[in-house]
Image (tube, rainbow, N blue to C red):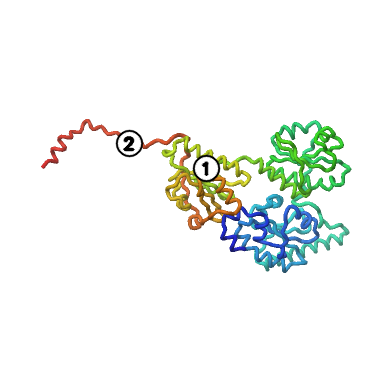
């Protein structure tokens, strides 16, 4: 499976959850596959010590860690729990625990709300040794707590911190329309009753999710709560009959019922989906420098690059037509959060050579995965239909790929940005021949 993952390169981008999990761990392994749906129950509410790996299917270091992670899980079976989260598939869980690189290993010990970073080696023996050291620390803490006659804090519910209740916006009959219906944000609103037991159980999850969502969406998605026993006007408007009821409000659209799970992980995952649905279209940038190229492509799982004909071949109108096609495609695929770049033919010759474009066939397009150093070329037409088919094939794990420039990043030149105008032919210098006596010159050459 490891060899297969390397061979298909960019195809990993389109793997489903099942495929990406199978590429690392399966039901036959002693590693517990963790998702937002089971994380709270398996890890947070457990009295066991947990080692959890946050990985991404495209990560080479994660692939190298997999056999040692499995060996460690088998060695620790019945002693320490070992799990794994596909943080590329479940971004909400990775976001909760501040995961920014892969693989990240965290230890969920005495206080499940504050896991520790594992700093040890990546061999199976080092992982086992680290787990046993953490287990000894946990047992000593429990022994100390027991001797003091205090209750242990090992089975706290929730994950990633308790959250801040103030991040849940209190909505009322008076402020609901202005904040929810007239605002530009997407809202998830809980309608509750103070006497409702399920509402009380949801409260800490809702608060924790509200804090995480506020941070991760920069306030673009907000969580609110309505006491339906007090604010009956707004509650009756939306036909609230059971508690808690959660509804999703998007500006200009009818509200929809939230049908997901009630853990903070489930709530955050849905909120991030709503955020990506309403995310701004990624900017289409001209390749002007190496820094711009690297930042755009290294910050994105996939970088789509258009190589457009020289301005003298198309004029401004023709070039803008090609750019408009790319902008429409970036809008269509904005949920993927890919990078979008373009350059003029001949401006970045090393880049063209590394992609095998080679000075002809413009306009051309390539999709690059800089982490895998793989790329795929558009074989169809440079049109909405052709590009859509090209990107759709990549997103579902199909399409022919090759290694980028022998595995090395091409040199990117610093160039001046296009001014938006038609190109100008080079001006040739005029020579005044009026003072030249051609007859005399010819006479001198006569034999």
Residue sitting at x 69%, y 45%: 273
Q: Which residue in the protein does label 1 denote?
A: 383
Crowd tier of the residue under label 1, counting other residues whose Cα lies within 10 Å: few below 14, some 14–19, many 20 or above: some
Q: Which residue in the protein does label 2 denote?
A: 428
Q: What element does badge 2 sit on? A: loop
Q: Is residue 228 above or below residue 372?
A: above
Instruction: Work out how far the residue at label 1 is from the one at label 2, CA to CA, in angstroms.
Output: 37 Å
Q: Where residue 391 sits: x, y (%)? A: 57, 48
* Res. 47 visible in picture: yes
| Res 70 quadrant in image | bottom right
Which badge, 1 or 2, comes first in the chain's sequence? 1
- 19 left or right, relative to 420: right
Q: Is residue 36 above or below residue 125?
A: above
- Count of marks, rendered view: 2
Q: Where residue 29 sits: x, y (%)? A: 71, 65
Q: Which of these two is toward me, 205 or 324? A: 324
Q: Where residue 341 sits: x, y (%)? A: 53, 44
Crowd tier of the residue under label 2, counting other residues whose Cα lies within 10 Å: few below 14, some 14–19, many 20 or above: few
* Res. 295 visible in picture: no
């Amino acid at each position: 499976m490891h060899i297969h993952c390397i061979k298909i390169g960019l195809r990993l981008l389109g793997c489903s959850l099942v495929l990406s999990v199978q590429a690392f761990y399966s039901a036959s392994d002693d590693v517990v596959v963790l998702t937002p749906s089971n994380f709270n129950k398996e890890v947070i509410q457990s009295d066991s010590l947990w080692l959890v790996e946050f990985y991404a299917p495209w990560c080479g270091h994660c692939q190298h860690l997999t056999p040692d992670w499995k060996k460690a899980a088998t060695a620790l079976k019945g002693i320490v729990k070992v799990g794994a989260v596909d943080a590329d598939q479940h971004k909400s869980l990775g976001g909760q625990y501040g995961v920014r690189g892969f693989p990240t290993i965290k230890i969920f010990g005495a206080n499940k709300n504050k896991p520790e970073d594992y700093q040890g080696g990546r061999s199976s023996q080092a992982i086992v040794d680290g787990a046993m050291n953490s287990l000894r620390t946990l047992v000593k803490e429990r022994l100390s707590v027991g001797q003091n006659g205090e209750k242990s804090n090992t089975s706290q519910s929730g994950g990633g911190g308790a959250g801040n209740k103030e991040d849940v916006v209190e909505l009322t009959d008076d402020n609901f329309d202005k904040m929810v219906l007239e605002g530009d944000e997407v809202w998830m609103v809980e309608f509750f009753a103070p006497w409702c037991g399920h509402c009380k159980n949801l409260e800490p999850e809702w608060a924790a999710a509200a804090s995480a969502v506020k941070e991760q969406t920069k306030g673009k998605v907000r969580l609110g709560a309505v006491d339906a026993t007090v604010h009956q006007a707004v509650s009756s408007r939306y036909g609230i009959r059971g508690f808690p009821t959660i509804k999703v409000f998007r500006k200009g659209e009818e509200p929809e019922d939230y049908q997901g799970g009630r853990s903070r992980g489930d709530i955050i995952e849905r909120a991030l989906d709503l955020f990506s649905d309403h995310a701004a279209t990624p900017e289409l940038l001209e390749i002007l420098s190496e820094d711009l190229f690297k930042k755009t492509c290294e910050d994105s799982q996939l970088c789509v690059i258009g190589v457009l004909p020289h301005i003298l071949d198309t004029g401004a109108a023709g070039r803008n037509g090609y750019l408009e096609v790319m902008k429409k495609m970036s809008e269509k695929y904005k949920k993927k959060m890919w990078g979008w770049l373009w350059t003029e033919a001949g401006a970045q010759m090393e880049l063209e050579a590394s992609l095998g474009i080679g000075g002809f066939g413009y306009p051309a397009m390539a999709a690059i995965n800089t982490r895998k150093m793989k790329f795929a070329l558009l074989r169809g037409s440079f049109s909405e239909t052709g590009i859509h088919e090209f990107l759709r094939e990549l997103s579902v794990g199909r399409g022919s790929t090759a290694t980028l420039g022998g595995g090395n990043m091409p040199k990117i030149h610093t160039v001046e940005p296009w001014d938006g105008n038609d190109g100008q032919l080079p001006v040739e210098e005029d020579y005044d021949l009026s003072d030249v006596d051609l007859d005399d010159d010819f006479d001198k050459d006569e034999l």
